Amino acid sequence: MSLNPDTKVLSYYDVLLRQSDLDLFTGPHWLNDQCIAFYFEYLIHEVYPKSADVLLVPGATSYLLATSKPTASAHQQSLPHKISPPRLTLLSNYRCRSS
């Protein structure tokens, strides 16, 4: 019996995964925003919970930074304020072209 693609499977902090998100892991598919957001949430809360050395920029923020006019104030406001720059920053890249 297959589940409805809209069935809620996991709620983890700010991310809700549905069956259709999990189905992406069963074949050669691109991961969607929700899968990437889940992984970032997992890293933030389980792997680097109190680390100031790691900055994980969510997909929505990456998209906003990539598509907005480059003004220093907008970009500074969209990222978390830290005293010192992180040693590692991860952003999602959504630019995919089909051939």
Image (cartoon, rainbow, N blue to C red):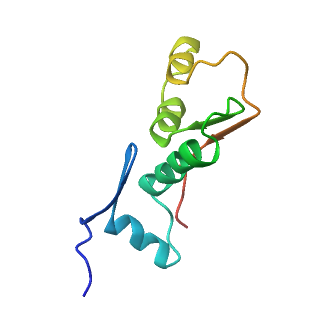
Q: How many marks?
A: 0
In the image, 20: left or right of 3? Answer: right
Q: Observer-nearest residue: 5 or 64?
A: 5
Quarter of the figure that contains the C terminus: bottom right
* Residue visible at 54% across and 11% down in the picture: 73
**Could you tell me residue 93's position as x and y percent?**
58, 47
Quarter of the figure that contains the N terminus: bottom left
* Residue visible at 40% across and 73% down in the picture: 23
Residue 93 visible in the displayed image:
no
Q: Observer-nearest residue: 47 or 18?
A: 47
**Furthest-top residue in this view:** 73
* Residue visible at 25% across and 77% down in the picture: 3
Q: Is residue 72 above or below residue 51?
A: above
**Could you tell me residue 5's position as x and y percent?**
27, 70
Q: Quadrant of residue 85?
A: top right
* Residue visible at 53% across and 76% down in the picture: 28
**Could you tell me residue 79's position as x and y percent?**
55, 24
Q: Is residue 87 above or below residue 98?
A: above
In the image, 14: left or right of 3? Answer: right
Q: Quadrant of residue 10?
A: bottom left
Residue 12 visible in the displayed image:
yes
Q: Is residue 39 above or below residue 90?
A: below
